[in-house]
Image: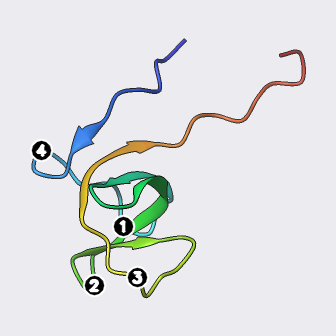
């Protein structure tokens, strides 16, 4: 089973464009968002116009299986 506390620095790697991931914004904390390569910016799912200062990200966990 994969650990879901494996944050990736934006300096090391960026997620695929417009793929929803968990993002860590140094001011807002953890939320869902995506990387918009057209503007070279992260966008929050809650407010796509909010400026995000993302330092780290990680893939979303897999949904639970029916037996879990």
Q: Residues within 10 Å of mark 1 (few under 14, many from 20)?
A: some
Q: Which badge, 2 or 4, is on the more N-terminal residue?
A: 4
- The residue tagged 3 is 50
Residue placed at 72% from the left, 35% from the top? 63
Q: Is residue 26 above or below residue 42?
A: above
SS for dot 3: loop
Q: Mark 2 and mark 3: span between their CA atoms?
A: 16 Å
Q: CA distance from mark 3 to mark 4?
A: 24 Å
Q: Mark 2 touching mark 1, by CB under 8 A?
A: yes
- Outermost residue on the top side: it is 1
Residue named by callout 2? 38
Mark 4 sits on what residue? 12
User: Which is more N-terminal, label 3 or label 2?
Assistant: 2
- The answer to whether the residues at label 2 and label 3 have Cβ atoms under 8 Å apart is no
Dot 3 crowding, Cα within 10 Å, few <14, some 14–19, many 20+:
few
Vertical relation: 24 (above or below) 5: below
């Amino acid at each position: 089973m994969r650990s879901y506390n494996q944050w990736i620095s934006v300096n090391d790697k960026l997620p695929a464009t417009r793929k929803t991931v968990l993002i860590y914004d140094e001011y807002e904390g953890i939320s869902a968002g995506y990387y918009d390569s057209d503007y070279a910016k992260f966008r929050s799912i809650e407010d796509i116009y909010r400026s995000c200062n993302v330092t780290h990200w990680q893939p979303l966990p897999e949904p639970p299986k029916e037996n879990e």
